[in-house]
Image (cartoon, grey):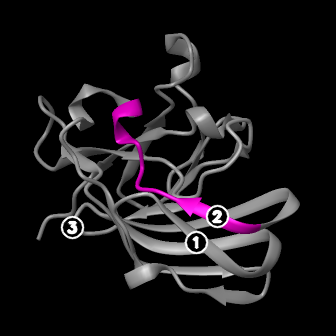
Amino acid sequence: MASPLRDGSFDIAEMVYLSAPVSSVRLGPPEVTMAGDRFAKLKPVASQVQMSAGDQPVVVPKGRVGNRVDVALVEPAKQMELRYNLSGVTVRSIPSRAGRAVAAITPLASGSPNLRVVMMVSGDTVLNIECPMRRGISEQACVAGRVPHLRARGELPLSRAVIVVQFNLPRT
């Protein structure tokens, strides 16, 4: 679940469910270039990263993910939860009305490329989402649900799990 914040960053809650227990997990900043050239110069960073595996807290070094990092779990787990602030993923929409922006969101946790991902966005300023890695215009227009709770229609394989969120930045 991703929710836009006033500064264009996102508050993220990420749940990971695996078929077999693992003893470590690789975390990495979103690969925003999968969402298109307009995101190519961005440097995404996850900060204030909190992580649990099973019912155990897990330490993420410095609470920050700006590069790929392997995190050891206290004990093997099939279920993990991550909460974090994601910045460096938003650009203003040009041309568009003042305050309109788009953000590229992908999962922080990595694993099997075929792992299935459900992506959701909530917030009163969210307007639309698209799935740029899907084939064809009709598949890329993947929004389901109603504002303020939108999701990508169906599941995405982890290797193609990216959404572009269109939203309005609040007036300050």
User: Looking at the rendering, in which quadrant would you find the N terminus?
Assistant: bottom right
| Mark 3 or mark 2: whose residue is earlier in sequence | 3
Question: Crowding near pointer 1: few (<14 within 10 Å), some, many (20+)?
Answer: some
The residue that disc 2 covers is: 25
Rendered residue at 57%/47% (across/down) = 146
**Mark 3 is on which residue type?**
Asp
Residue stretch in magenta:
23-34
The quadrant holding residue 154 is: top right
Which image quarter holds the C terminus? Answer: bottom left
Residue where numbered disc 1 is placed? 71
Residue drawn at x 44%, y 81% is 61
- In the rendered structure, the answer to whether residue 125 lies left or right of residue 123 reads left
The one of 86 and 10 positioned closer to us in this rendering: 86
**Residue 88 image position (x, y, % from top left):** 25, 56
Q: Which residue is mark 3?
A: 7
Residue at 41% across, 31% down: 34
- Camera-near label (3 vs 2) is 2
Q: At label 1, which amino acid type do we have? A: Val
Name which of mark 1 and mark 2 comes first in the sequence: 2
